[in-house]
Every structure is written in C-alpha cells, then in structure tokens.
C-alpha cells in the first residue's frame, strides 16, 4: 500500500514522502493532512498543475529543491519572491513565475497511477480547476 493517497479530479494516485531528502517539508505537510484544495494549470512552468497558497507559511527553507521536477514529482515552493505553492508535474517543467525561475522542495513522488497524470493535466488545462486531496494511504 502507498504511504499517501492523492485524489485529483477523477483519478487516484499512490505516492510516497521523500522523507530522507526533505524531512522538514515532509513533516510540515504531514501535519496538515488531510490536505484538500484545487489544482489549476500552471501559467509559466510548462506541464504541471499547481495549488496557489498565497502567503501560507510552512516554516521550511529549501531542501531537495529543484527547478525541473520530473513527471510525478510534487514540489513545495516555500514562498519568498513569489507566493507559496505546491506543484505536481505531469510532463516537462521549468519551474518559474512572473518574477523568473524558482526552485521548489521535491517532497512527494507519485508511485502509482502515473499513466493518468497527463490526462489530469490536460483536463485541468481545458476544463478548469480540479479538486485535489492528499491523505495517508
């Protein structure tokens, strides 16, 4: 069984925390579970969906950060020059905002249901915001 269950739109994904590489981010997010919101399609970053979180403070700095998450990687941008956000990559991503390139903490990896990621992304692009929920598996 997966450590996490992510329900996004009509799809269910299994996932795991990247505990060894991003322990502080994992702990901060785990404390917020279950976490429910909506994803919208990214504006500048390529093939991803994101949860805009405004000035929400997770109390973490950079760890295991990247500007190029792979499909199935979930990253948290902890805020700073742009708003706090969570991004789920479904294809090629060059993580950016209106102020330029960003790096986010890779703290979750999708482990099952990967074949539905691109469909979720395209659905979000063409049909609009989709509900998303993260909970322990």
Image: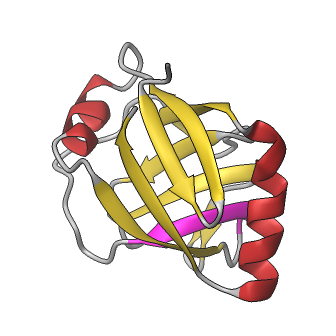
Residue 88 in percent (x, y) is at 60, 53
Q: What secondary structure prevails in the magenta region?
A: strand
Residue situated in front as seen by the camera: 78 or 136 = 136
Residue situated in front as seen by the camera: 71 or 7 = 7
Position of residue 6 relative to residue 53, above or below, is above
Question: In the figure, residue 87 lies in which quadrant?
Answer: bottom right
Position of residue 105 relative to residue 123, above or below, is above
Residue 44 in percent (x, y) is at 71, 73
Q: Residue at 79% across / 49% down in the picture?
A: 116
Q: Is residue 46 magenta?
A: yes
Question: In the figure, residue 77 lies in which quadrant?
Answer: bottom left
Position of residue 32 relative to residue 39, above or below, is above
Instruction: Mark yes or no: residue 1 visible.
Output: yes
Instruction: Mark yes or no: residue 105 visible.
Output: no
Residue 134 in percent (x, y) is at 40, 49
- Return the residue found at the far bottom: 127
Q: Is residue 110 magenta?
A: no
Q: Residue at 75% across / 86% down in the picture?
A: 127
On the rendered structure, is 5 left or right of 41? left
Residue 62 in percent (x, y) is at 36, 39
On the rendered structure, is 108 left or right of 56? right
Q: Residue at 21% across / 32% down in the picture?
A: 27
Residue situated in front as seen by the camera: 20 or 1 = 1
On the rendered structure, is 47 left or right of 69? right
Which region of the structure is painted magenta? 45-52
């Amino acid at each position: 069984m997966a450590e996490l269950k992510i329900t996004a739109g009509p799809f269910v994904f299994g996932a795991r925390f990247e505990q060894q590489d991003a322990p502080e981010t994992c702990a901060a997010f785990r404390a917020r579970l279950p976490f429910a919101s909506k994803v919208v399609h990214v504006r500048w970053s390529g093939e991803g969906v994101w949860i805009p979180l405004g000035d929400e403070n997770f109390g973490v700095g950079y760890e295991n950060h990247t500007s190029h998450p792979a499909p199935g990687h979930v990253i948290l941008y902890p805020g700073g020059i742009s708003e706090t956000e969570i991004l789920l990559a479904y294809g090629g991503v060059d993580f950016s905002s209106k102020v330029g390139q960003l790096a986010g903490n890779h703290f979750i990896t999708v482990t099952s249901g990967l074949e539905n990621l691109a469909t979720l992304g395209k659905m979000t692009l063409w049909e609009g915001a989709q509900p998303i929920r993260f909970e322990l598996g």
